[in-house]
Amino acid sequence: MSEPGSSLPEHVESTVQAIAAMHAEHEVSANPAERLADDVTARLGNPMSVGLLVVFVLAWIGINLGLKILRPPAFDAPPFEWLDLLLSFAAAFMTMVVLASQHRAEVLAGRRQQLMLQLAFLSDHKQAKIISLLEELRRDDPLIHDRHDHEAEAMTHTSNPAEVLDAIRDTRDALVSKQKR
């Protein structure tokens, strides 16, 4: 899987490829509405947009106050009800766009967390195998004193995800009940 000229080891390159494929699939699977929400959020979520909004509001107020002084009818005289309505609509619109974009980001974050969990359990299995092989080598090598290592023996067994989850839940519950007392 390693590209020619890549300085990354093959196992690292395969991980990079898997993560990149996950991100690419996330981007490709976006429907047009999700792409639009992401684009609007990206464009409006920068400091330049804040500056433009301030300039727009000040210009709106300035033009209306200027028209009031010059005596032609202002299109939105103080207290600027049309500006208030426009800004309220824009705020509601942006809230919905940000929520839609955030939901998509949370989907990707969930996929990343699932990947990290899978990698953690894979790492646990690999470590248990390495410890098991080292213990076997220690027992088989006549030059190494044979002794029973309880800790190493325990580490040769992989973690059971359900048991780990139950232990975390039980420990958390015990700590919460202890702090409530």
Image (spheres, grey):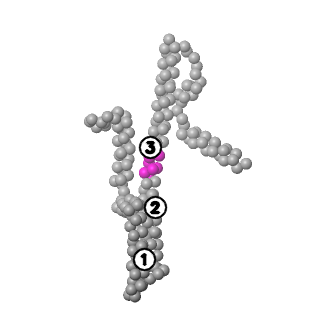
Prevailing SS of the magenta stretch:
helix
Q: Secondary structure at mark 2?
A: helix
In magenta stretch: residue 45: no
Residue 67's image quarter? bottom left
- The residue singled out by tag 3 in the image is 115
Q: Position of residue 101 (x, y in %)?
A: 42, 59
Q: Estimate the spatial distance between the alpha carbons at disc 2 and disc 3, rounded to whole Å.
A: 24 Å
The first of marks 2 and 3 along the sequence is: 2
Give the numbered dot on residue 61. 1
Residue 152's image quarter? top right
In magenta stretch: residue 112: yes
- The residue singled out by tag 2 in the image is 99
Judge whether 104 appears above or below 164 on screen: below
Residue at left 38%, top 44%?
19
Magenta region: which residues? 107-115
Residue at left 43%, top 66%?
94
Given the image, on which type of amino acid does mark 1 rest?
A: Ile
Q: Position of residue 65 (x, y in %)?
A: 42, 81
Given the image, on which type of amino acid does mark 3 rest?
A: Leu
Q: Position of residue 123 (x, y in %)?
A: 47, 34
Count of marks overlaid on the render: 3
Q: Position of residue 104 (x, y in %)?
A: 42, 56
